[in-house]
Image (tube, coloured by chain):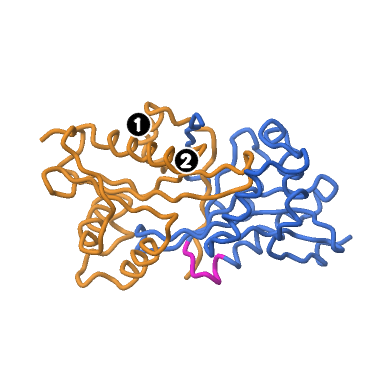
Chain colours: A blue, B orange
Amino acid sequence: MSVDKTNIRDAIKDDLITIVSMLADDPLGQSRESTVEPLDQNYLDAFAAIDADANQLLAVVEIDNVIAGCLQISFIPGLSRSGMWRAQIESVRIDKEFRDKGLGQVMIEWAIVEAEKRGCGLVQLTSDIQRPQAIRFYEKLGFVNSHAGMKLELDK
Amino acid sequence: MSVDKTNIRDAIKDDLITIVSMLADDPLGQSRESTVEPLDQNYLDAFAAIDADANQLLAVVEIDNVIAGCLQISFIPGLSRSGMWRAQIESVRIDKEFRDKGLGQVMIEWAIVEAEKRGCGLVQLTSDIQRPQAIRFYEKLGFVNSHAGMKLELDK
C-alpha cells in the first residue's frame, strides 16, 4: 500500500455507512455517532443536504478501491478580508488500518488545492484541544493556531 | 438609545458600504478592507454569493433606522454528531458609536435563536487570540473555548 496510489473522489450515498463508522471510531466520536443499520435518518438527511449544496464537498480517499479516509470542505463566501471566500475543513477521519502512513497529509494537501481552485484566500479548521497531535499535524502543514475555536451546544 | 429598540434584518445591497466600513474600522480589519467607493467588485461578488445561498445569512442590526452592527451566519450541514447542522457566526462588528451598550449580546442571542429555528445542534465561531475581550464575551454567553482555530492563508 502506498499513499502515492490514492484516489480522492466525491462521496456517494453507498459510502455513508463506511464514513459514519470512521466518525464513530474515535475517542470523541464514539459517544456522538451511531452505526446501527439502517442508519439513522439524520445521517441520510445530512448527506442529502451536503449533496444538494454546491458549496459543500464531502470526499473519501481510497487505496486500492477501499475507503481509507474522509473529509468535508465547506466553501463559505464572506465580506471580510475584501470579500474573500474561505474553505473550511471538517470531519477529517482516517480508518485506523490506514493511519501513520501520511494519508492525512495527502488529504489536507488535496483540500488546499481544491480551495485554491475555488479562489479561496484562506483554509480554516478547528481542532479539539484534546487532540494535541492533530494540532501539531496541522501546524506542520502551515496552519497557524491563531484563533480560539468556541462552541455552544444547543439543546435539541 | 436602548438596545431594547433594536431591529435585526437581512442585509441588502445598499447596506454594503456601511458594513464594509464597520469591517474596516478595527485594528485587524483596517489592513484587510478597502472602503474606497465604488466598492471593490470582490465585495459586490461576495454579497451576491451570500444573497444567493440559502445557507448564508448576513444580517444588520438597526437602532432608530441606523445600522449599528452586522454579523453573518453560515448554516453548515454535516455528518458528524449524528448528522447535525451547525451554525457558524462570522464577521461580527459593532459600529464604534454603539459599543459597550450590550448590543453584541443582543446580536449573538438573536443568532442563537436563528440557529435553533434551523434545527442546528451547535453554534460555533472563532475569535482571534489577539482579542481576549471578545473571547471572554463569548464565554459569558455560554461558548466553550474548546478548540484551536487554525488558519492557513493562501497566496492568491
Question: What residue is shown with label 1?
Answer: B137
Quadrant of residue B134 in the image?
top left
In the visual, does B155 lie left or right of B19? Answer: right
> Element at badge 2?
strand
Residue A138 location in percent, x, y?
A: 62, 50
Residue drawn 49% across the image and 35% down it: A151
Q: Which mark is residue B86?
A: none
Q: Quadrant of residue B127?
A: top left
Name the residue rendered at 76%, 43% in the picture.
A38
Same chain letter for marks 1 and 2: yes
Labels 1 and 2 touching (C-beta < 8 A):
no
Q: Residues within 10 Å of mark 2 (few under 14, many from 20)?
A: many
Mark 1 vs mark 2: in front: 2
* Mark 1 residue type: Phe
Q: Alpha-carbon neighbours of circle 1 within 10 Å: few (<14), some, or many (≥20)?
A: few
| Magenta stretch encompasses residue A118 | yes
Q: Which residue is nearer to you in this view: B39 or A41?
A: A41
Q: Amino acid at mark 2?
A: Gln
Q: Which residues are magenta?
A: A115-121
Whole-percent x and y of residue A63?
83, 61
- The earlier-in-sequence mark between 1 and 2 is 2
Determine whether the residue tagged by mark 1 lies in a helix, strand or loop. helix
Mark 2, residue position: B124
Quadrant that contains the N terminus of chain A:
bottom right
Judged left or right of residue B101, residue B145 is right
Residue that sits furthest to the right in the current view:
A1
Of residues A102 and B44, which is closer to you in this image?
B44
Looking at the picture, how far across and down is residue B35, in whole percent?
22, 64
User: Residue A45 appears at what percent x and percent y?
Assistant: 61, 49
Q: CA distance from mark 1 to mark 2?
A: 14 Å
The residue located at (70%, 60%) in the rendering is A11
